């Protein structure tokens, strides 16, 4: 990896930090038209690092509507993610009587997580940990491949902000209309338009908070409880919290969350390298920038006509032409905006495009390097992803529907009975994860001569222990070893196994434990 | 002096006018969001003073409009818990120990209560796991001095052993050595006989010598064969369990001093329901008969 790419990468980062490179411009005074038929936007990159101070009020951003490939992808991702979020709690899944029929339900009261056919008990929460590890590794991998894809397309903050901006645009019009309205004195038009916007935001926020609580309680029941105002207080509390956060973070704070609150932009700086595909301005092609007059030749100047459409559409208020920067969520809307302009002025598209630091550097010397998707970093992430995924699959497929936990008594460790035999006590928990009653028989293995008894059960009841559906049964088990056998034990601790046999299908579950005695 | 604050030439920020050895402090305003959070906290705290207990007074404190009190809340919770247990406790009070053991719900409740009461009252002598100690019986095993049936255990818990209660279980083994009933040699021989009864290594000649002594002095309580007598609390000498130790020295000391452990009566200290719970709990430890 020591091939100069670190140097390129560090250069890029330094440019990001110092912001020293001033744009070269051909215009002595900016003309109102950047190119024939293309108005120059007055958009300011208010959130460039140099342009913002910690104690300054937020400068509002009025992102212009973009249209193109990436905008369409973003609409699609929004539809899918929001669709899943709002619809999932309403899907049903039959699990038999006395059990919830909600396909996805996190039931805190009974310590169960239901995911369609899968049911995870509290003690198996490592499956959820595994899922989170998978999610983290997937995030690392896509970041190494293509930068902040998560931030730009799928992060809830991005998706909801996008939705809130769409609503704002619906009531108030596009960028220029919104800016006019913001400057206009208070009057009927401003009040109803702003009122409608905020009411719509609030409605979205309530729907978001409402959908959230549905994940924790039977959705139809809770919806009826909300209608009749007799839902549990905690449901109202979380509805309130999520309504407030959606409204404030998605409607009001927007890009401020990404720039100031979120740790992920800081972490991701270390996740991509000189070979990651990032939304980049191809300065080698664009500079020197400036207005383009009709009929003017393109020779000796850059393709950038300095129309600032990339700034106008930016939801975080930056100028992508300043290079990679922490504030950029890489939503690629500037690519759409710029391609539009390039098409109109008759230049090739992709002046702003997904590109790598290495390629940008090579291109500035008139060279090209291929894009390397397979690199030690991506191979490592993909390998880890595959490994953890395999472990999860194996664990899930080996997940037993009859689980047995055995805990040996620790106080006392063993009891000497009057005939000299040694008795150990065990707490045995049998977990039946099926939706039907099961009968099991207990047995011992590896402890010849030992007697087994269950507290509170006579000898006839013991071979036929019933465990109710989706439930656990605790038993106190006594294992007694006669005097001679106990004396013959080689050590004070003897490993053996408790065997739980399912009487219906004959499967046996073994749990290793220890039989303790006074020893030699 | 110039009223306008000095501007630091490097950063362009105002200075506070404070200077230490040529180092000047910049007057950087707080971030707005931080300042607003601070103001919000101040407003919140005023509301808090009004609504909640806040200011100490000479006697007492301002109680606040919300009427919140941690102490009362605890009291309420305890009362609620008591009320919730009331039904089960009433059922326990009415039922006999046998009935409690036969009903799964009552049994579960009694076991939980019995475990807690055992920890509070019995564990100091019998141990947290009821494993006992030298002189304090192990309650997990199947060897009972005064009987291991529910009724026997209840009787023992209620009135104790050699306690001050009138109904106490009581018996006294003579102090054969201290009261000079037997000579040292005889006691030594008897100890060998006791070892023989329980199948332990012993001096066969001494044990044989002690047989008539055993019949004269011990058999009345411990039985001809040494099997003991639960009516009298006389331990079974043939089994593998020793309350005061099974070494010869321990046995000699038992014969010399007569031992005679004491357990207090719990009737009067604990209510009848708790004693029933304790009875069921002890019975369930594994040795109940």
Image (cartoon, coloured by chain):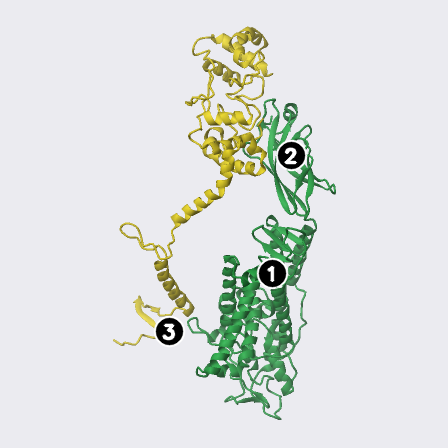
Chain colours: A green, B yellow
**Residue bearing the label numbered 3:** B13
Instruction: Tell which tag, 3 or 1, sits nearer the viewer.
Output: 1
The residue pinned by badge 1 equals A220
Q: Secondary structure at mark 3?
A: loop
Label 3 lies in what chain?
A: B
- Labels 3, 2: one chain: no
The residue where tag 2 is placed is: A495
Q: Position of residue A280 (x, y in %)?
A: 59, 75
Q: Residue at x 51, y 9 (%)?
A: B217
> Can you say which quadrant of the picture contains the N terminus of chain A?
bottom right
Depth check, front residue: B43 or B180: B43
Which secondary structure, mark 1? helix
From what the image shows, is residue B174 above or below residue A159? above
Is A155 or A102 nearer to us in this picture? Answer: A102
Q: Tell me the chain of label 2.
A: A
A457 to A76, vertically: above or below: above
Residue A145 position in % (x across, y down): 64, 67
């Amino acid at each position: 990896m020591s091939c100069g790419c670190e140097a390129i990468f560090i250069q890029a980062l330094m440019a990001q930090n110092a912001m020293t490179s001033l744009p070269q411009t051909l215009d002595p005074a900016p003309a109102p038209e950047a190119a024939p038929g293309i108005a120059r936007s007055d958009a300011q990159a208010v959130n460039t690092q140099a342009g913002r101070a910690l104690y300054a009020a937020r400068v509002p951003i009025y992102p212009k509507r973009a249209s193109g490939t990436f905008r369409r992808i973003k609409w699609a991702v929004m539809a899918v993610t929001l669709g899943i979020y709002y619809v999932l709690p309403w899907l049903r899944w039959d699990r038999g009587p006395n059990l919830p029929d909600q396909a996805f339900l996190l039931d805190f009261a009974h310590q169960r997580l239901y995911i369609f056919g899968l049911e995870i008990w509290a003690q198996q929460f490592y499956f959820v940990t595994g899922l989170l590890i998978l999610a983290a590794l997937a995030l690392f991998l896509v970041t190494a491949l293509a930068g902040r894809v998560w931030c730009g397309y799928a992060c809830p903050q991005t998706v909801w902000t996008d939705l809130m901006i769409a609503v704002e645009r619906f009531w108030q019009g596009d960028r220029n209309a919104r800016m006019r309205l913001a400057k206009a004195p208070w009057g009927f038009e401003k009040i109803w338009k702003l009122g409608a916007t905020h009411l719509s935001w609030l409605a979205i926020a309530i729907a978001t908070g409402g959908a959230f609580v549905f994940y924790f309680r039977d959705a139809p029941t809770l919806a009826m409880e909300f209608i009749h105002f007799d839902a549990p207080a905690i449901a109202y509390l979380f509805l309130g919290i999520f309504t407030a956060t959606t409204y404030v973070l998605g409607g009001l704070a927007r890009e401020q969350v990404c720039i100031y609150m979120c740790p992920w932009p800081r972490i991701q700086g270390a996740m991509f390298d000189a070979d990651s595909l990032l939304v980049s301005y191809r300065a080698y092609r664009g500079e020197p920038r400036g207005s383009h007059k009709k009929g003017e030749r393109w020779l000796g100047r850059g393709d950038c006509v300095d129309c600032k459409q990339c700034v106008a559409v930016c939801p975080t208020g930056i100028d992508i032409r300043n290079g990679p920067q922490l504030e950029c969520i890489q939503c690629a809307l500037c690519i759409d905006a710029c391609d539009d302009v390039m098409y109109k002025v008759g230049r090739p598209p992709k002046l702003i495009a997904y590109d790598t630091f290495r390629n940008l550097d090579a291109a500035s010397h008139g060279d090209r390097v291929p894009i390397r998707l397979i690199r030690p970093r991506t191979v490592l992430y993909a390998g880890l992803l595959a490994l953890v995924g395999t472990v999860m699959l194996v664990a899930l497929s080996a997940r037993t529907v009859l689980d047995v936990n055995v805990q040996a008594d620790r106080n006392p460790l063993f009891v000497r009975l009057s005939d000299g035999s040694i008795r150990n006590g065990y707490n045995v928990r049998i977990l039946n994860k099926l939706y039907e009653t099961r009968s099991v028989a207990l047995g011992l293995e590896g402890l010849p001569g030992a007697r087994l008894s269950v507290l509170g059960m006579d000898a006839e009841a013991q071979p036929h222990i019933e465990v109710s559906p989706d439930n656990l049964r605790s038993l106190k088990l006594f294992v007694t070893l006669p005097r001679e056998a106990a004396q013959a034990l080689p050590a004070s601790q003897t490993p053996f196994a408790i065997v739980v046999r399912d009487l219906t299908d004959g499967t046996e579950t073994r749990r290793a434990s220890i039989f303790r005695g006074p020893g030699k | 002096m110039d009223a306008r604050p000095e501007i630091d030439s490097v950063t362009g920020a105002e200075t506070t006018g404070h200077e230490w050895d040529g180092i000047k402090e910049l007057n950087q305003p707080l971030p707005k969001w931080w300042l607003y959070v601070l103001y919000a906290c101040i407003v919140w705290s005023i509301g808090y003073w009004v609504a909640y207990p806040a200011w100490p007074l000479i006697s007492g404190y301002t109680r606040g409009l919300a009427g919140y009190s941690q102490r009362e809340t605890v009291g309420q919770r305890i009362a609620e818990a008591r009320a919730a247990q009331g039904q089960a406790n009433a059922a326990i009070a009415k039922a006999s120990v046998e009935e409690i053991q036969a009903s799964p719900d009552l049994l579960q409740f009694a076991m939980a209560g019995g475990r807690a009461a055992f920890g509070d009252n019995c564990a100091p002598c019998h141990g947290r796991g009821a494993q006992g100690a030298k002189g304090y019986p192990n309650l997990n095993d199947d060897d009972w001095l005064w009987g291991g049936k529910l009724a026997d255990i209840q009787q023992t818990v209620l009135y104790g052993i050699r306690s001050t209660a009138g109904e106490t279980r009581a018996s006294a083994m003579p102090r054969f050595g201290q009261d000079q009933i037997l000579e040292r040699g005889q006691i030594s021989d008897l100890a060998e006989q006791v070892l023989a009864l329980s199948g332990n290594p012993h001096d066969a000649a001494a044990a044989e010598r002690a047989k008539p002594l055993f019949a004269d002095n011990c058999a009345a309580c411990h039985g001809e064969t040494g099997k003991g007598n639960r009516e009298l609390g006389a331990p079974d000498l043939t089994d593998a369990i020793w309350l005061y130790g099974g070494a010869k020295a321990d046995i000699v000391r038992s014969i010399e001093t007569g031992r005679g452990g004491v357990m207090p009566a719990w009737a009067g200290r604990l209510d009848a329901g708790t004693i029933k719970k304790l009875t069921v709990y002890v019975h369930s430890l594994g040795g109940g008969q």
